[in-house]
Amino acid sequence: MKTDLWSLYALMLKSRLFEEAIAKLWHDGLISGEMHLGTGEEAIIAGVVTQLRDGDAMALDHRGTAALLMRGVEPVLILRELLGYPDGLCGGMGGHLHLFSKEHLAASSGIVGAEGPTAAGFALSAQYSNPGAIAVAFFGEGAMNQGMLTESLNLASVWNLPVLFVCKDDGWSITTKSESMTGGNLNERARGLGVPAVEVDGCDVSEVWEAAHSAIERARSGKGPTFLHARCVHLEGHFLGFQLIRLTRNPLKEMPEIAIPLTYSFLQPGGAAFRERMAGLKTVLSSVLSTLRDPRRDSTNDPLRRARKNLLSDPERLQELENQIEQEINQVLASSLAEAPS
């Protein structure tokens, strides 16, 4: 069995355009609350989800939209859910953080690390009632500091559960660099619990597919769990409206909102000592400068561009495919925004 880059790219593009449509609706005020997109994770999701079959389960984090879409959940139902309509996937009650599809054995949660116990439960059930089926857990590297995820890795190892633990590592835990709050090596953590660990480039869909294929076959054959560590870049940061990204994209508009309060606070009499104020100012400037050098600004870290580059040998087929998917997403958007039947 070999990778089909055309099919993988089609799913990745569909996911990207779908989430870009979500972003526009959010910016227009039609979707409320925080919005966590999976733009930049498409290669990881596609490389794993395309190898799942009936009876396999998914435990998803707060970026579950792409996985549900690629798994075959009706996109109109997803979008109607995000819009809060009662005919959405979860009756308009789940929002984007808590999406469920019983038909697809898929459950997402906004609780960091909850994917571990959920996947372990799915896998334990499969072990007894549906041998050969597996469960997949998708989570960020920050979740590895949650006890219940570590406990799930341990349990999967001890009970030889058919689980693929997929760590989507973008190097950030919300707005904090992960390296400043995570000790040791994540792969060694997993291996220390008896779970084999594989490192992959999460921006290369073919590499992810190959690694996931071996891990999934291992789980199906009763050889237990695998930890797949995939490095990626969240193109929109932790959430839509991520402050530092706004600053780099529109500095003339955003900088005064930061600089003026900082200057006012810096010059105020009383309060912290001058040395402490200088230290705070340096911290802010350091964050801004690190964002200017951020990998999100490097086009080579976009998994879609990486995959598309390998398909340029057939430009007519590529253009036809892209036009078709764009039309599909436009139809989904039109149907989702239509008034619900009375």
Image (spheres, rainbow, N blue to C red):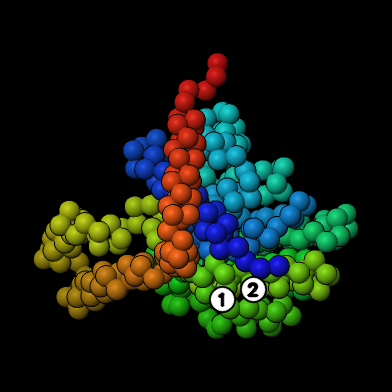
Element type at marker 1? strand
Q: Quadrant of the C terminus?
A: top right
| Mark 1 lies on residue | 200
- Residue 289 place in picture, x, y as percent: 25, 73
Examine the rendering and report whether any part of residue 233 can be seen: no
Q: Position of residue 98 (x, y in %)?
A: 58, 46
Looking at the image, residue 330 sits to the left or right of residue 135; the answer is: left
Q: Quadrant of the N terminus?
A: bottom right
Check disc 1 and give the amino acid type: Val
| Quadrant of the rendered image containing residue 118 | bottom right
Real-space CA distance between mark 1 and mark 2, rounded to the nearest whole angstrom: 7 Å
Q: Secondary structure at mark 2?
A: helix
The residue where tag 2 is placed is: 211
- Left or right: 297 with respect to 138? left
- Tell me, yes or no, whether the two marked residues, 1 and 2, touch with CB atoms within 8 Å: yes
Residue at left 82%, top 57%?
126
Picture quadrant of residue 99 = top right
Report which quarter residue 157 is drawn in. Answer: bottom right
Image height check: is 211 above or below 305?
Answer: below
Task: Tell me residue 108's x, y (percent).
Answer: 61, 51
Q: Is residue 36 left or right of residue 253?
A: right
Crowdedness near tag 1: few (<14), some (14–19) or many (≥20) residues, C-alpha within 10 Å: many
Of residues 239 and 22, the one drawn nearer to the viewer in this rendering = 22
Total numbered circles = 2
What residue is drawn where x is 47% and y is 35%? 331
Whether residue 330 is visible: yes
- What amino acid is labelled 2 in the image? Ala
Q: Which mark is residue 177?
A: none
Q: Residue at x 70, y 79 (%)?
A: 196
| Residue at 62 percent of width and 83 percent of height | 188
The residue closer to the viewer here, 34 or 207, is 207
Which of the two discs, 1 and 2, labels the residue nearer the N terminus? 1
